[in-house]
Amino acid sequence: MCESEDDLTPADRELETALRSVAPTGATIDPVAAAFSAGQVAARTDVRRWRAAAMILLVVSAASWLRPALQDRGDGGPREASIEMKSTTLVVADRSVTPPFAPQTILMLQQAVNDRGLSALPASELPTVRATRAADAL
């Protein structure tokens, strides 16, 4: 034995024997839970970055919107922001002919039903269905 063990108090010796009897247990790590936790941490970081970027853009846009109202006139007093509204009328003549809607579109079908009732709906064009049996497949 080492010389340092002779200097142990009875309480230290009791602790030493108790620690020698303790065996470590195998650690089990759930890989799905670990991946989920890592994803949460990564997403939290991304969300913080997006929030910071949005806040910076909000502050910059608010400052650019308020800046004209806060500029001074040069004599020390604040100047009022003035916005001139100009009225411009633009007339465009569209001479292109739009083709009529196909008769099977929902707009044309609704218009036909409104004008002439349900009898105006076209006959359905369903394919013929043959009855098949399991014996036919074998």
Image: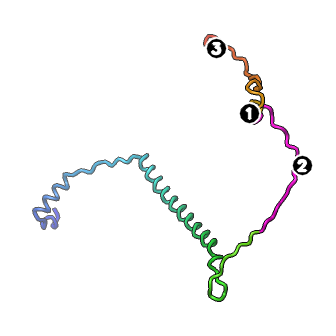
The amino acid type, in three-letter code, at marker 1 is Gln
Position in image of residue 74 (x %, y %): 66, 87
The residue where tag 1 is placed is 110
The residue most toward the left is 10
Q: What secondary structure characterizes most of the magenta part?
A: loop
Q: Examine the rendered structure and indicate whether residue 21 appears above or below residue 121.
A: below
Quadrant in the picture for residue 7 = bottom left
The residue where tag 2 is placed is 95
How far apart are the two marked residues, 1 and 2, measured between alpha carbons?
A: 27 Å
Q: Residue at x 73, y 34 (%)?
A: 106
Describe residue 126's horizontal placement relative to residue 41 as left or right: right
- Residues at marks 1 and 2 touching, judged by CB atoms closer than 8 Å: no
Residue bounds of the magenta highlight:
86-109
Q: Residue at x 65, y 81 (%)?
A: 79
Q: Nearer the viewer, mark 1 or mark 2?
A: 1
- Residues at marks 2 and 3 touching, judged by CB atoms closer than 8 Å: no
The residue where tag 3 is placed is 137
Q: Secondary structure at mark 1?
A: helix
Position in image of residue 123 (x %, y %): 76, 22
Describe residue 15's horizontal placement relative to residue 107 as left or right: left
Count residues near mark 3 (Cα–Cα under 10 Å), then give few for <14, some for 14-19, many for 20+: few
